[in-house]
């Protein structure tokens, strides 16, 4: 009986040491991957290519749900459109930005200075803007233009957020 107990105890100890070794080894590999600059598998909802878009178009795309994306305005109907007096836009159509909603809802956090008009698509669109340090949310007309900032007779506006829903 003592032999069986000793054998079981030895097996349990060896198994525990092996499991701890594997766990430590995996943790070391994970740390090494993190230190090597490999991206995390955790989604942070940051906008892909945001730095290049900021440099080229002068619009800061911060984060979103992936269902409301900046697209080229040429020959595409049914988009959310924004006009801005943004002098940092070096695109082919300066100050004209288009966004496509790919689904029943979409969300995008951004920063677009000197915005003055938003055109809705067939979704219910809400635009959050700040004017003189005061934030407000504006309902955008479906398939029509809505003035914000100087387009609404106030001071310059910064567009902060677009939300679209069915």
Image (spheres, rainbow, N blue to C red):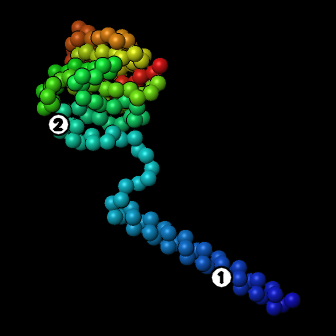
Residue 145, how many percent across, how many down? 29, 11
Give the left or right position of residue 109, taking residue 54 as reference: right
Q: Is residue 38 above or below residue 81?
A: below
> Residue tagged by mark 2?
56
Q: Nearer the viewer, residue 138 or 22?
A: 22
Nearer-N-terminus badge (1/2): 1
Image disc number at residue 90:
none
Answer yes or no: do the residues labelled 1 and 2 have beta carbons within 8 Å? no
Give how far apart the Cα atoms at labels 1 and 2 are: 60 Å
- Report if residue 124 is visible in the image: yes
Residue drawn at point x = 33 percent, y = 60 percent: 37
Q: Is residue 163 above or below residue 62?
A: above
- Report if residue 114 is visible in the image: no
Foreground disc of the pair 1, 2: 2
Please rate how many residues cluster around mark 2, counting C-alpha atoms within 10 Å: few if below 14, some from 14 to 19, many from 20.
Answer: few
Residue drawn at point x = 44 percent, y = 27 percent: 103
Q: Is residue 71 above or below residue 131?
A: below
> Residue tagged by mark 1?
14
Taking the view exactly as shown, the residue that stands out farthest to the bottom is: 3
Residue 20, how many percent across, how many down? 58, 74
Dot 2 falls on a residue whose secondary structure is helix
Please rate how many residues cluster around mark 1, counting C-alpha atoms within 10 Å: few if below 14, some from 14 to 19, many from 20.
Answer: few
Dot 1 falls on a residue whose secondary structure is helix
Quarter holding the N terminus is bottom right
Give the left or right position of residue 147, taking residue 2 as reference: left
Residue 104, how many percent across, how many down? 47, 24
């Amino acid at each position: 009986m003592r032999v069986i107990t000793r054998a079981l105890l030895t097996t349990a100890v060896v198994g525990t040491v092996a499991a701890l070794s594997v766990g430590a080894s995996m943790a070391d590999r994970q740390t090494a991957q993190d230190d090597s600059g490999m991206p995390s598998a955790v989604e942070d909802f940051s906008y892909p290519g945001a730095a290049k878009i900021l440099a080229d178009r002068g619009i800061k795309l911060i984060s979103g749900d992936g269902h409301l994306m900046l697209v080229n305005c040429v020959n595409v109907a049914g988009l959310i459109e924004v006009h801005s007096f943004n002098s940092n836009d070096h695109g082919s159509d300066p100050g004209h930005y288009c966004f496509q909603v790919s689904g029943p809802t979409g969300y995008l956090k951004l920063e677009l200075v000197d915005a003055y008009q938003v055109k809705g698509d067939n979704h219910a669109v809400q635009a959050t803007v700040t004017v003189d340090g005061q934030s407000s949310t504006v309902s955008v007309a479906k398939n029509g233009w809505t003035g914000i900032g100087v387009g609404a007779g106030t001071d310059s506006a910064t567009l902060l957020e677009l939300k679209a829903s069915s």
